[in-house]
């Protein structure tokens, strides 16, 4: 199971700058087994990335 402290830290960073940390946050959710949240984050933010 992923480190919940790391997820919480990434969630705080995500609130400040989602573009910068969405992939790391989604990956930690994936590792923790919360695939629905990971997919939701990716679906919302991947289309916003120009490259």
Image: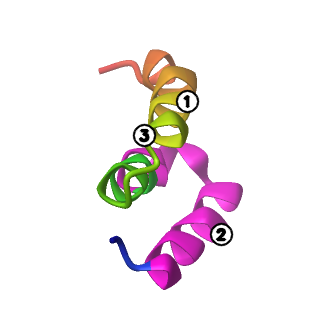
Q: Residue at x 46, y 30 (%)?
A: 39
Q: Residue at x 30, y 57 (%)?
A: 31
State the separation of the CA atoms marked 3 and 1.
8 Å
Q: Earlier in the sequence, mark 1 or mark 2?
A: 2
Residue occupied by mark 3: 35
Residue occupied by mark 1: 40
Q: Nearer the viewer, mark 2 or mark 3?
A: 3
Mark 1 surroundings: few (<14), some (14-19) or many (≥20) residues within 10 A: few
Disc 2 vs disc 3: Cβ atoms closer than 8 Å? no
Q: Earlier in the sequence, mark 2 or mark 3?
A: 2
State which region is magenta.
Answer: 4-24
When the figure is inspected, residue 2 is found, relative to residue 25, above or below; the finding is below
Q: Which mark is residue 18?
A: none
Horizontal relation, residue 12 to residue 5: left or right: right
When the figure is inspected, residue 24 is found, relative to residue 22, above or below; the finding is below
Task: Indicate the quadrant where residue 42 lies.
Answer: top left
**Please, what secondary structure does the residue beneath circle 3 have?**
helix
State the separation of the CA atoms marked 2 and 3.
20 Å
Q: Which mark is residue 12?
A: 2
Give the image location of residue 25, x and y in percent.
Answer: 45, 55
Disc 1 vs disc 2: Cβ atoms closer than 8 Å? no
Give the image location of residue 22, x and y in percent.
Answer: 47, 46
Q: Nearer the viewer, mark 1 or mark 2?
A: 1
Q: Main secondary structure of the magenta part?
A: helix
Quadrant where the N terminus sits is: bottom left
**Please, what secondary structure does the residue beneath circle 2 have?**
helix
Horizontal relation, residue 20 to residue 15: left or right: left
Horizontal relation, residue 30 to residue 8: left or right: left
């Amino acid at each position: 199971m992923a480190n919940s402290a790391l997820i919480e830290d990434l969630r705080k960073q995500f609130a400040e700058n989602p573009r910068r940390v969405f992939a790391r946050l989604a990956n930690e959710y994936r590792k923790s087994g919360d695939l629905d949240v990971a997919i939701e984050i990716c679906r919302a933010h991947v289309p916003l990335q120009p490259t």
